[in-house]
Amino acid sequence: MGVEGIGASVVRKEDRRFITGKGRYVDDIKLVGMTHAHFIRSPHAHAKIKSIDTSEAMKMPGVVGVLTGQQVVDDKIGNLICGWAITSKDGTGMKMGAWPAMAPETVRFVGQAVAVVIAETKNQARDAAEAVVVNYEELPAVPDIRAAIAPGAPQLHPEAPGNVIYDWTIGDEAATDAAFKSAANVVSLDITNNRLVPNAMEPRAAIAEYNEPEEHFTLYTTSQNPHVARLVLSAFYNIAQEHKLRVVAPDVGGGFGSKIFIYPEEMVALWASKKVGRPVKWTGDRTEAFLTDAHGRDHLTKAEMAFDKDNKVTGLRVKTYANLGGYMSLFSSSVPTYLYATLLSGQYNIPNIFAEVISVYTNTVPVDAYRGAGRPEASFVVERLMETAARQLKVDPAELRKKNFITQFPHQTPVIMAYDIGDFHASLDAAMKAIDYAGFPARKAKAKSEGKLRGIGISCYIEACGIAPSKAVGSLGAGVGLWESAEVRVNPVGTIEILTGSHSHGQGHETTFCQLIADRLGVPISQVQIVHGDTDKVQFGMGTYGSRSAAVGLTAILKAMEKVEAKAKKIAAHQLEASENDIVIENGEFKVAGTDKSLALPMVALAAYTAHNLPDGMEPGLKEGAFYDPTNFTFPAGAYICEMEVDAGTGKSTFVNFVAADDFGRLINPMIVEGQVHGGLAQGIGQALLEGVVYDSSGQLVTASFMDYTMPRADDLPSFKLSHTTTLCPGNPLGVKGCGEAGAIGASAAVINAITDAIDNNKLEMPATPDRVWHAIHG
Amino acid sequence: MYQTTYHRPSSVDEAASLFAKGSDAKYLAGGHTLIPVMKQRLASPSDVIDLCKIKELVGIEPTGDGIMIKAATTHSDVASSETVQKAIPALAYLASLIGDPAVRHRGTIGGSLANNDPAADYPAAVLACGATVKTNKRSISADDFFKGLFSTALEDGEIITAVSFPVQDKAGYAKFNHPASRFALTGVFVAKTPAGDVRAAATGASQNGVMRVPAIEAALKANWSAAALDNVNISADGLMNDIHGTSDYRANLVKVMAQRAVTAAS
Amino acid sequence: MSTVKLTVNGKAVSAEVEDRTLLVHLLRDHLNLTGTHVGCDTSQCGACVVHIDGRAVKSCTVLAGQAAGSNVTTIEGIAKGDELHPMQAAFRDNHGLQCGYCTPGMIMSAIDIVHRHSGNLDEATVRHELEGNICRCTGYHNIVKAVLDAAGRMKVAQAAE
């Protein structure tokens, strides 16, 4: 590796603009003639809209227009879509109710938009919004899963009787039941996977501009995948034609899944820009983020694990209810099914698995992918069961895991996934060594003598990343292919532009993607520019989520790069009068192996563009594109161990140590990889200890601000001790697996396993707040 | 935020006369309660009258038997004041726990007391120390000042000018943070006067705001030690009950925080 | 409407604004200093932290009028030309930022922390002092590292002056 090549911890190129305050986020953009939108939102969880009177608001100072849900319908704007079709066990399709961008008749969660005011200033829009009179007829609300499935529960959508969207199964039920019948021991758990708010620090925002003579729209928006936004806005929502719509996602302040989706506010801004004939800006505030960004998780699960007399797992049976909120968000259907139940084998050889997932409507914000998306829920089920089993069977939790680890690869699980490679012993051993697992009993005894409760918790996670092989996901109901595209442009002077369909909103692509080029060509990364986030510049792309940007996005760049290199070698060989097979690339030079003849990259590039002396029949220029479709998922895996101390007087849990040993395959930039792990761990720990959405019985969101929803702060978290074990991913030429979600997937179970160990009570729900822990200790 | 008119008087009298002229005026101190509420459009004062640039309202002075903290003195200035650290170190410590550093740079003792948030820190110190709240009209003893949730003895237009804290023989504060807001989920201030009187006040616990805790006071008067509270029973009746802490949990915190406050004071 | 006069990043500025205007909006909308961000509406996230007369404050919780006559420093005002402030450099070198949205407020708070502690900081103090700044990306690990690193650099820079 060179100093800037693959494997080097290069400091980030993009940082300078962020640390000097020169980042350019959507809200930083001003357009000439720009107006401001403010949405009028339902204060009720479930209600009929009897009437909306906008006449007074229209007379308010600065008001340019007031638009309502009925106008959305009148203009034939399409309802929001769900991009993954799930089939129930009885063969019927999922029962999806309509979700218009603004509600014309019925609201189904607090915060759902019913109208929008467009005015000259933000304050004027908000002032006028108070003059819009909406009459509601309140309906009984269904605030959670239990209420949704209760007999006689209020019905949200006529399409979904009993509020059930689908009842889906995976695995062999009969074989699994048989495994339980013959089991020596059975361990069972009821698990609540708490509902979370992604809370990227930058609230969502959109600026839409319509160019009337050109019939052309531009949308600046906080998106993880601007091309998908353009596709959906044009193909399904009928607002603009695809070739007449440019979507730009400039600097985006974090996403964590929540900025994958194309929300009503962005749709309305785009539509309204044409209606009012002026650019329209909407910037959400934090309250709106709580009320409208897709939430994550929210499962109720009963899980059972069967063991034989040798403590080998023989079966796993899981029944999960998933809350999808008031409407089906873009990928909501896939999260508790194909992104969840397919990972229930964990790191273990489990011959029989059967899972049933019932997804339901409730009068809450729609739920969709949030960092990890289904895999944290799966990992939590498996790792809580393993820990519980070790306690019940009175064996060491590390030994029980090791006894059941998969050791032969490839390994076909009973739930679709075929693990390509891994070394689970290596990561658990590394983590145990890092935390001095053997010394824990002595530390626990010492803490006890000081009146402290100390516990240790292990979590061995696996995830499926590099989303995803298009043919495979297509056969499972996905509405899109999940490849990635790239283009490599070598300019006439030899500088390079990489156009990618991946989108960086904190991941550091502007650095890591350049490192590949530095590695291949030996040029400094300062000569390489990454272009992303603009549908006018990049031909197409599927965006960034599911830890896919290295495994899929960077591989697409590599494929384009290989084409560029092949052509450049031909040009160099022609110019140097050598055979192209003898050309090697070193330090930015095309050399004839074994000679001192060489041509620098700028000279090759110049030759390509002057075209004065190219091989016969060769097209001028040096620019190549590629689409890369992965052949399999990748399977990052690792072991997290956490040691905690609990204050019996207050129930407060404090970290003594947190170690992580991950296997992400090849690391492009270890510094950035570790940063991704830190952030993921913080979100996993946040779920375990701090974060949890609470709705009251009427469907009001109690945790609607940072005053009540506990975001992890610096003093809530420890410094993390990270290490890496490596098995190279065989599925892609770079050997990379993806690192963005691991921490969020693996951390929660380690924390809960540690606290329940410390307090010697296995019954503890997330978030394990001091109040809950204190009650678990004292009854 | 609704439209409003901002005023910056240079004296307490000017502030009071501006207040009288406004149709629905409000005083603005550090602004860290009023401005968020105005941003949410839950308050719509016609006029906001900034007290922070009034020189006579800023500063900390030793008095014969204690210290006087003027109303517009910020939390950070109280926390770092040598005068406070010397006279009543627990008070400086309490100020260092309010909000976060940026909040402490703006928030003031007068603003905190006038607002009387049931989970604010200062009311616990004022009540436990038996401090006196001085206004532009009168002096109000701590026992008379706090009137329940967000309610005080202040009359319309009355301005807190200072708070006088008598020096204590021993004083300690222990706070258990509300995990999200970082207000007190429960905080207890314990104080023992040179004459041997003991007062203990809890914030964040009661539905009626800051409260004295007689059971703790009695136990500590008999024996000033954390162990003396081991068998004290705090009733959960009337305590707050919310997603961050049930009332029985808060009752436990009152006792545990009181014990830790005593330990810190000794 | 009122005319608010103040000094921002060493320059005297004046703006005609509604009295309800917050300092953060004066900076962003009237002075085009968009490095100061808004991440919440309850004065908690710290994305909006600037210095007023040398002290870190949340500019979303200060009326523009309250800042009149003050000396305001924003993230755009701390580098000396091309030379980054040691805190900026430490954030970059320690990978103390990912999406960059909380970063300006984080850096402004961190400079204030180092100043108030005269550079004598340990990990626990830094973590406690960052209570008013929320980051969703980094898990704070590298932010804490960056602040400790910068504390050392700022001591050296001060000694050299």
Image (tube, rainbow, N blue to C red):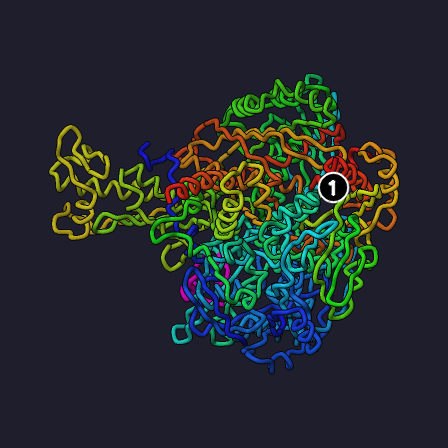
* Residue A682 highlighted magenta (yes or no): no
Q: The C terminus of chain A lies in which quarter of the figure?
A: top right
Query: Could you tell whether B118 is left or right of A85 in the image?
Result: right
What x and y, as percent, mark residue C123?
A: 55, 36
Relative vertical location of residue B2 with respect to residue B61 in this rendering, above or below: below
Answer whether residue A294 is visible to the viewer in this image.
Answer: no
Residue drawn at the location 30% of the way across and 39% of the way down: A518
Name the one closer to the observer, A306 or A675: A675
Q: Callout 1, which amino acid?
A: Gly
Task: For mark 1, give the secondary structure.
Answer: strand
What x and y, as percent, mark residue A702?
A: 72, 55
Q: What stretch is highlighted in magenta?
A: A229-249
What x and y, as percent, mark residue A676?
A: 50, 40
Q: Mark 1 points at which residue?
A: B172
* Occupied quadrant, residue B138: bottom right
What x and y, as percent, mark residue A288?
A: 61, 60
